[in-house]
Image (spheres, helix red, strand yellow):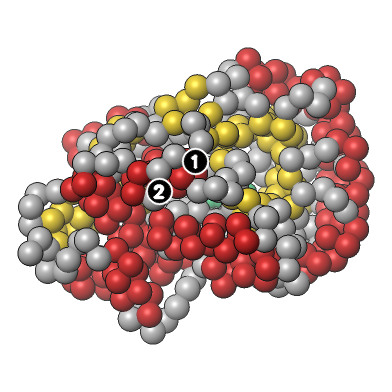
Amino acid sequence: MTTIERAEVLITSPGRNFVTLRITTSDGVTGLGDATLNGRELAVASYLEDHIVPLLIGRDPARIEDMWQYLYRGAYWRRGPVTMTAIAAVDTALWDIKGKVAGLPVYQLLGGRSRDGVLVYTHASGSDTEALLDDVARAQDLGYQAIRAQAAVPGIAGTYGVKKNGRYEPANSSLPEEQPWSTEDYLRFAPTYLRAVRERFGFDFHLLHDVHHRLTPIEAARFGKEVEDVRLFWMEDPTPAESQDAFRLIREHTTTPVAVGEALTSIWDVQHLITAQLIDYVRTTVVHAGGITHLRRIFDLAALYQVRSGSHGASDLSPVCQAAAIHLDTAIPNFGIQEHMGYPEQVSEVFRTGVTYADGHLHVSDAPGLGVEYDDEAAARFPYSPKYLPVARRLDGSVHDW
Ligand code: GCO
Ligand code: MG
């Protein structure tokens, strides 16, 4: 019987930090899984190295579902980002291996194509409305049909979602940077720049906006209602989602579609949001929500309630996660949209991916498995250094949701 012979936790920082699990079978087949948890990378690396790798050796790599159940139920301690990211890494690597053994790309193992390409949205942002409009024009020139718009709130240094020198990378500091926040200023300003985007570019493309957990439910309801004329594709994370029922209030007041999920890690975290139809798009990911196996289960539940996928795809999700996401997006019936933020240049030296961009869509290659290769020599040139996400404080100094 083929068994798992080796599992290595690989850490590298080609412009940003990534953790990758590589599993090798007794037949010499390797599989990759993303294990990156932004700002908490080493916790997952230790969970894998100290508590999972020893359990993998000698097991059958073909038993993907059984491995998922074993690592989830078998740990006794359930859910949470560290556990679910570690399980995801194993699961993704085993799908990669299964594809290579079968000689098929992963989307074929998931039932084959449901679509020709995966619609993606890119980021446009600016230090003010004019700069944002220039960036929207740039995104349109690149062929994007869906664009997320964010602008810096006047007087609020370091507003989330805004690029500096052409890139947005919030995990940029060896200790967490503290950034100010004013809900009042945001609520006054954001509708004006979203309106300016529609006035300049019209309605012939999808416009998205990320609220990034900054509002209370009633504030989010007011915001959603106020921007209805802008016809957003979605407002993302309008309020923190620990309390799923909080979204009911938002729903009761506005027809602006709602997307949630990048910080949620299991089907139970989105169960009520989906079954009560409190959201329109579920944004959970391969890497943080238990891998391809578990994310497929979330999307299948969502399909029953006319909720579509809209997976998070920021630069802290590695090209291995991105490829896995595009395979899943290609196969599922209820795909909505996929985030495509792009990576620092050096990332392509370490990860050689078969994912390609054309005309506002991403495409997977037909290479067996996920179609991503990891270059150890290149990885060694980019040593890890801790980088934290910022912390937000209200103008009175108290901590706010970042
Ligand atoms: C997004 C996100 C990200 C997150 C980041 C946290 O919608 O792309 O909100 O930018 O803040 O991925 O690690
Ligand atoms: Mg977001």
Task: Kindly state the secondary structure of the residue where label 1 is placed.
Answer: loop
Cα separation between marks 2 and 1: 8 Å
The image quadrant where one finds the C terminus is bottom right
Residue at screen point 74% across, 40% down? 233
- The residue sitting at the bottom extreme is 76
Whole-percent x and y of residue 343? 46, 33
Kindly check if marks 2 and 1 are in contact, taking CB atoms under 8 A apart as contact.
Answer: yes
Total marks drawn?
2
Q: Give the residue number, with chain letter if any, for mark 2.
A: 111
Whole-percent x and y of residue 282? 62, 55
Residue at screen point 39% across, 84% down? 76
Could you say which disc has been placed on residue 114 in the image? 1
In the picture provided, is 51 more to the left or to the right than 120? Answer: left
In the picture provided, is 228 more to the left or to the right than 161? Answer: right
Task: Kindly state the secondary structure of the residue where label 2 is placed.
Answer: loop
Is residue 349 in sight in this rendering? yes
Mark 1 C-beta closer than 8 Å to ligand 1: no
Instruction: Give the quarter of the image for residue 373.
Output: top left
Could you say which disc has been placed on residue 243 in the image? none
Residue at screen point 61% across, 34% down? 121
Residue type pointed to by label 1: Ser
In the picture provided, is 224 more to the left or to the right than 66? Answer: right
Residue type pointed to by label 2: Gly
